[in-house]
Amino acid sequence: MYGAVIHAPGDVRYEEREDPAILEPTDAVVRTVAACVCGSDLWRYRGISPVPKPTPIGHEYCGVVEAVGDAVTSVKVGDFVVGGFLYSDNTCPVCRKGAHANCQHGGGYAGCQADRIRVPQADGTLVATPEMPADDLIPSILALSDVMCTGWHAAVSAGVGPGKSVAVVGDGAVGLCAVLAAVQLGAETVIAMSRHDSRQKVATEFGATHIIAERGEDGIAKIRELTEGIGADCVLECVGTQDARLQAVGCVRDGGNIGLVGVPHGELPVDKLFWRNVGIKGGPAHCREYLPQLLELVLARKINPGLVFDLELPLSEIAEAYAAMDERRAIKSLVRP
Ligand SMILES: [Zn+2]
């Protein structure tokens, strides 16, 4: 089979790779229907995170089950499935609390941008659709593998609910999904911070009530204008850079909450936040916890997070899928084998 391998910053190749096999009785092998490139894949592509050796890459997928181990009971060959970017057993004490990203028997993938994927802990990771989904739903189902669950996690972590004012820092796919999540969770004011026309359009389509193009102090001033001068109840930080984290700190009101889902690449002034009574929560999303509910919303066509994909390419053009995102010609690239 073929799949993506990152060799060095800026160098992702479509290469022949070993076919995945059932190694544990709890495994499944999934034939990929669609996969995509994540903003967090770009950390390595841009040389910000190291690439010590050629490594299969990708952690978002949906597809059809091709084989299962003897212990797998909840999915069967032929099922259409989606799984989160981390696998989990869905049975350990941590999973039973809904914190699947921190499963005691969980872990991550390397190499989901590929024809086939080995999924460990298939029962605790994959969720099957009741029937083969319509083709136009594939992007939205794929979005549940990471970005939509991550946006949702930002909103849940920041305590978004009815009547709240929410500011979203970051207009990448996760930030846009965080806008959609905040709207779904009943927020009254949802402010997307975005300078890019195409991304502003998606944010508006997702239900953002306001768009703010300014950043830094000007951005903070604009947020305050919309929030009785105090800042937003909930700020969803969906980037992870130092600038974005400080933007979130500046936009939140005293006594408010910051939901953090951007992979951290900078400090947070925790001591300062203490005196302001600001809550901080977040981390990798508990996809398996959110998947059933969000999949239901997608299949009922109540949410369409697949709008974040504005480029679709064959898997063989994975190098271009990365380049387009890196150069901001695309919000998010979807690839099909
Ligand atoms: Zn677990």
Image (cartoon, rainbow, N blue to C red):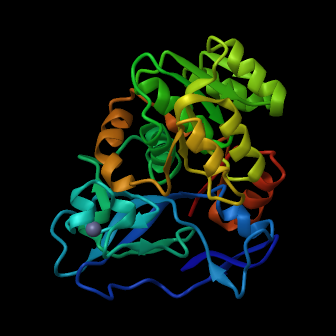
Along the viewing direction, whichever of 160 and 185 lies nearer the viewer = 160
At horizontal 74% and vertical 31% (from top left) the residue drawn is 194
Q: In which quarter of the image is the C terminus?
A: bottom right
| Label total for image | 0
In the shown orientation, is residue 135 left or right of residue 263? left
At horizontal 61% and vertical 73% (from top left) the residue drawn is 57
User: Measured along the vertical axis of the image, is residue 43 above or below residue 13?
Assistant: above
Along the viewing direction, whichever of 167 and 27 lies nearer the viewer = 167
Residue 32, position as x, y percentages in the image = 46, 64
Residue 113, position as x, y percentages in the image = 57, 67
At horizontal 80% and vertical 46% (from top left) the residue drawn is 328
Along the viewing direction, whichever of 176 and 231 lies nearer the viewer = 231
Residue 117, position as x, y percentages in the image = 45, 73
Residue 193, position as x, y percentages in the image = 71, 29
In the shown orientation, is residue 135 left or right of residue 224? left
Q: Confirm whether residue 307 shows in the render.
A: no
Q: Confirm whether residue 244 shows in the render.
A: yes
> Which corner quadrant of the image does residue 52 belong to?
bottom right
User: Measured along the vertical axis of the image, is residue 285 above or below residue 214?
Assistant: below
User: Measured along the vertical axis of the image, is residue 298 above or below residue 333?
Assistant: above
> If the picture is divided into quarters, which one holds ligand 1?
bottom left
Residue sticking out furthest to the front:
275
In the shown orientation, is residue 207 left or right of residue 79? right
> Which corner quadrant of the image does residue 272 belong to?
top right
Q: In which quarter of the image is the N terminus?
A: bottom right
